[in-house]
Image (cartoon, helix red, strand yellow):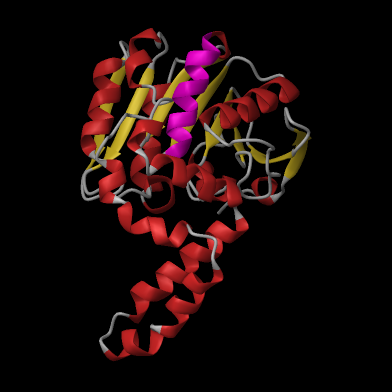
Amino acid sequence: RVSQLFTTLHQITGPAGETLAFRTAGHGPPLVFLHGFLGSSACWSALVPYLTDRYCCIALDLPGFGASGRPSGVYGVGTAVAGVAALVNALNISPCGLVGHSFGGWVAAAYALAYPESVYSLALVAAAGIRDDGFSQRFAWLRPLLWPHPWVDWGLQGVMPLARLVNRHREVLRLRQFRQLLAQQPVARQFLLARLRPEAAVDTVDQDLPRLQVPALVVAGERDRVIPLAHAQAYAQGIPQAQLVVLPAAGHGLPQHHAAALAPHLLDFWAGRNPI
């Protein structure tokens, strides 16, 4: 069961004056959890109960996601890193361990590069952040869903009767839900639109990984359809003190759907690797 404390959202002020929301539970050395794209701090609810006896678990809603406010200006990984820095400074938890899933893993690696003295360990779970020029081609189908025009929603609604006839209505429903998520989180639309242009991939971390002198655990799902296994391998090969774990038969949602398998690897990795 999730600690009652972890269900409560707390707030601080972000670097641009926006609200940053976070959850916390447990006692011990601080761990900061960073969720994936279109997610929130709630994505860690299944994993946190395995950790709270030994660690203080602090999960942030990254700027523009969950209950955190939308930052001004162009949204990028640097914006998210600034939000993490604001949390660490406000709670006075430097150095801390960082745990990032998917987009949150990218942010965690970028934060560790920017603030190496502030991180005592790094856990990258199905992490994005490795340059992938094939991304724009694989996800080109997303582009129409990113258009703000209402006729996209009308079109999805209009094809639903035909989709039911051919038993494809669940796919259309998922597309409509994705559109609703984008409407609620405008920074997500802005970020994805940029990433569908290969020339925009200038803030990935792969070239800088050898500078990370912190112990790192890289975890991948064997059946991840979102982040290729090659990305996890690139992290493990690029970070000097990294180890790679591949969870059998696991997909992309490791914190949400494979917490029981993920937790022992994290606990083994952290044993003896905190400053307290």
User: Looking at the picture, how far across and down is residue 188, in whole percent?
Assistant: 53, 48
Expressed as whole percent of the image width and height from the top left, the position of residue 263 reads 40, 38
Q: Quadrant of residue 174?
A: bottom left
Q: Judge left or right: residue 22 versus residue 224.
A: right
Across the whole image, how many numbered discs are drawn on residues?
0
Q: Is residue 47 above or below residue 165?
A: above
State the residue in front, 66 or 26.
Answer: 66
Q: Is 21 positioned to the left or the right of 32 in the image?
A: right
Q: Is residue 193 above or below residue 231?
A: below
Q: Is residue 227 visible?
A: no
Quadrant assignment for the C terminus: top right
Residue 33 on the magenta span: no
Q: Position of residue 106 (x, y in %)?
A: 43, 30
Where does residue 195 sit, x and y in percent of width and height? 41, 40
Is 165 left, or right, of 82 in this rendering?
left
Residue under the image location 47 percent in, 57 percent down: 146
| Residue 65 in view in this figure | yes
Q: Nearer the viewer, residue 236 or 96?
A: 236
Start and end of the magenta stretch?
103-116
Residue nearest the viewer, comparing 174 with 254: 174
**Whether residue 142 is situated above or below residue 31 in the rendered picture:** below
Residue at the image point whose x is 71% and y is 20% from the top: 89
The residue lying at 68 percent from left, 44 percent from top is 70
> How would you classify the magenta stretch by its main secondary structure?
helix
In the rendered image, which quarter contains the N terminus? bottom right
